[in-house]
Amino acid sequence: MERKVKIAQYGCGKMSAWLMRYAMEKGGEIVAAFDVNPAIIGKDISEIIGGNPIGVTISNIKDADAVLKNTKPDVCIIATRSTMKELEPAFTVCAQNGVNAISTCEEALFPWNSSPDITKRLDELAKANNCTLCGSGYPDLFWGTLVTNLAGSSAKITKIEGASSYNVEDYGIALAIAHGAGYGIEKFGKEIGNYNSLSSDEIKKLVESGEYLPSFMWNQNGWLCEKLGLTIVSQTQKCIPCTCKEDLHSNTLGMTIKAGDATGMRAVVTTETEEGITIETACIGKVYAPGEFDSNVWTLKGEPDTTVTVNNPATVELTCATLIGRIPQLIDARPGYVTTNNMQDNQYMVKPMNFYVKSL
């Protein structure tokens, strides 16, 4: 591809500062940007990224259809919310205009096993307009290809265990409450862990109907199984309270969590497969005690046992860099909603991104 890749940014919050800068540093051209915040609508994107004016102003999301028709970007980066239900309008306006779209939304990485109806609608719309939709970010590599590449060096695998932890203090009060932080154990069991005893079929039905929102690992296990060629027999989730032996103050909640009460939760997704490999993954979100930090740990059990640990990952920057690295593959992929397990693994772009695009 001889010209620069033209990119639109949908959502100009915190993460967009890295996304737009990384896109331009890799040779992409930002041609449009959208947001709902009246405080930044009409401003040059340099006010988000920093530096000198670029000549691209932030438009109201309501005008996305008209702006996309006018600017004709190759790709739209969507960085707004975390569920497919919330993202359907953004993906829809891109697909209607034949614009490839990629999102940081965690569920978007593999939404076929959590929002099948929405994903099917988007898949059909993208196919009709000859474009590709997908999700990428930190889970794509650190919960995905990192694991499958390790699997390629194993002689035998019987179980894959993964755990990723994060401090709910960093993400606001809504997330902290959703994780049960500050709840007594009895209240946690009634409001957070009330689905723990459900069978695989029962929880699958609730998830696919939209009545129950699973953890991000629900989607990740689906991604891993499809990438590894595993056939799922059952999949369940249990939410287990995290506790601390001492009182722990939470600035986000504005309270002191008493010793023994829930500081957050460990959401564990267990997937059994026909091939005999069990995948057990956990999202651990809690108010950290002194000395605790973010980590990402994966263990492959079999021959040999292998463990990889990533401590203090720069999750935001890694999310953005991983997504930008996916853009050439997104453009080259077949039309439809195509999850990244069906694309080649990310590679570091030493040349401008258009060099890696083959289809335009």
Image (cartoon, helix red, strand yellow):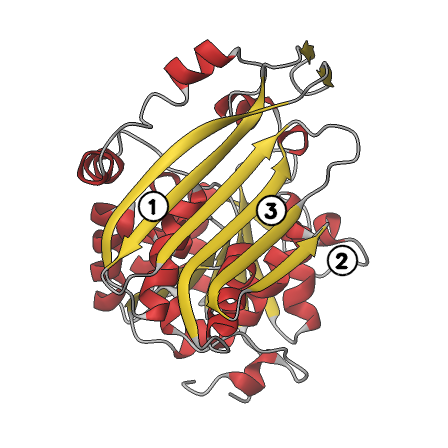
Within 10 Å of the Cα at label 1, are there few (<14), some (14-19), or many (20+) other Cα atoms?
some
Q: Nearer the viewer, mark 3 or mark 1?
A: 1
Cα separation, mark 3 vs mark 2, equals 16 Å
Query: Which of pointers 1 and 2 lies earlier in the amino acid sequence?
Result: 2
- x then y, percent, for residue 157: 41, 67
- x then y, percent, for residue 346: 54, 74
Q: Which of marks 1 and 2 is in front?
A: 1
Does 52 sit above or below residue 127? above
Q: Which amino acid does label 1 sit on?
A: Glu
Cα separation, mark 3 vs mark 1, equals 18 Å
Q: Nearer the viewer, residue 245 or 229?
A: 245
Specify whether 74 is left or right of 98: right
The residue that label 1 is drawn on is 88
Cα separation, mark 1 vs mark 2, equals 32 Å
Query: Which of pointers 3 and 1 lies earlier in the amino acid sequence?
Result: 3
Q: Can residue 87 be seen in this view?
A: no
The residue that label 3 is drawn on is 12
Does 292 sit above or below residue 147? above
Say which element carries label 3. Answer: loop
Specify whether 92 is left or right of 174: left
The residue that label 2 is drawn on is 53
Query: Which of pointers 3 and 2 lies earlier in the amino acid sequence?
Result: 3
Residue 123 is drawn in which quadrant? bottom left
- x then y, percent, for residue 261: 58, 14
Q: Which residue is drawn at 48% across and 43% down?
A: 282
Within 10 Å of the Cα at label 2, are there few (<14), some (14-19), or many (20+) other Cα atoms?
few
Q: What residue type is labelled 3?
A: Cys
